[in-house]
Image (cartoon, rainbow, N blue to C red):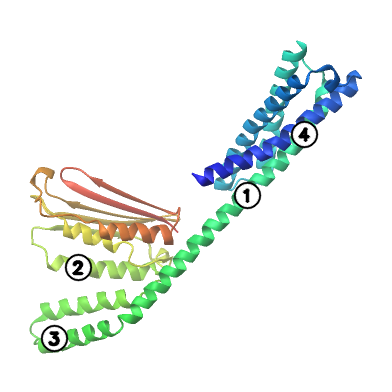
Amino acid sequence: MVKKIKQQLRQLYIAKYLGIVVIICMRICIDAYRNVKYWEVKSPGFLACDAIATIAVCYAFVYILQRWATYNQKHQSSLWKGYGVTIAISLVVISCYMAVRAYVQYHRFYSIQEGSVPLVLSALFGCICYGILRNSIDEAETRRLQIEQAELKNEQLNTELRALRAQYHPHFLFNALNTIYFQIGPENETPRHTIELLSEILRYQVNCGSEKVPLKQELEYLEKDISFRRLRCSDRLSLKVDFSIQEDEQNVMIYPLLFIPLVENAFKYIGGDKLSIDVKMLKTGKQLTFTIINSVPPIDAQMPSKTKTGTGLDNLRRRLSLLYPDHHTLELTRNNDFYSAKLTLTL
């Protein structure tokens, strides 16, 4: 709210000076052409209303420029396009205003000699206003990015600090797993394989940190994690995993552990008569799309005690907003039989 009020005050401030410029330009050009003095033939009240009306029109003009500058900043338009359209807007708005003004006051329109110079000067001042507004928007966007980068850096530092504090626990866990592994006889291949799988999963989670990793490593981790979770499921589960990523595209760098909350939710809330999980990942150009669909119990058949806290998804949204601001979409869809999660990253 405060930001919006400041923006409106800035627009009014610029509009006031633009209105003064427009009035002075029209008066100098028109009075010189007619050899009259406008302020001597009009009453003070009329002059005040004229000034207020001009500033009001200029405020609307500056508001249009503000929206145009915001659009250009968002779409990274070229300078030629930005200033070219600004000149066109200036000429159209000021021409319409001068035409209405002349008709109301004199019941006729200004001649080319009377209106050309005010139009040129108004277009020039409009370009100056556009430059000021565009620079202000760029500065605000720069400050926003700096704040987000500072938050991201702080988040990374906190993650590293938590990792350092918990460093003892992973070593203890790995040693415990190794002890259990060697206590199982070689003939028991299934439990030994399960421990190996769990050790590799935990090792990746501990060592990947908060820096980017190659997509290939993340895919290998996801496959192992899905295989491990599959061991705890019934034989009725129909599991499909399709990572359609070309070998030469698997070297792209991404932030780790962004897809695992969606996988965890799919295995956690799976249900229904036909248990199924369908996992897909596809890379198209600069977009990486991860989709996971799992069967769920009918809405009427869900157990009331099975409460969904949504903590994992909240944390995922928070990480995405810090790591991929304005470069991600997360779509969650639920119908009576299936739950779908689709995460798209622009790399």
Please give the residue where the numbered disc 1 appears in the rendered image.
136
Picture quadrant of residue 285: bottom left
Q: Indicate the secondary structure of the residue bearing disc 4.
A: helix
Of callouts 2 and 3, which one flags the residue occurring earlier in the amino acid sequence?
A: 3
Amino acid bearing label 2: Ser
Where residue 227 is drawn, which disc sits there? 2
Q: Quadrant of residue 16?
A: top right
Q: Residue furthest right?
A: 35
Give the residue type at disc 4: Val
Confirm whether residue 242 shows in the render. Answer: no
Image position, residue 254 (x, y; %): 41, 65
Please name the residue shown 8% across and 82% down the image: 188
In this view, 126 is above or below 338: above
Q: In the rendered structure, which amino acid carries the disc numbered 1?
A: Ser
Viewer-nearest of discs 1 and 4: 4
Q: Nearer the viewer, mark 2 or mark 4?
A: 4
In this rendering, position of residue 305 left or right of residue 81:
left
Quadrant housing the C terminus: bottom left
> Mark on residue 180?
3
Label 3: element kind: helix
> How much space separates mark 2 and mark 4, taking CA atoms?
72 Å
Viewed as shown, does residue 16 lie left or right of 245? right
How packed mark 1 is, by other alpha carbons closer than 10 Å (few <14, some 14-19, many 20 or more), is some
Q: Which secondary structure lies at badge 2?
A: helix
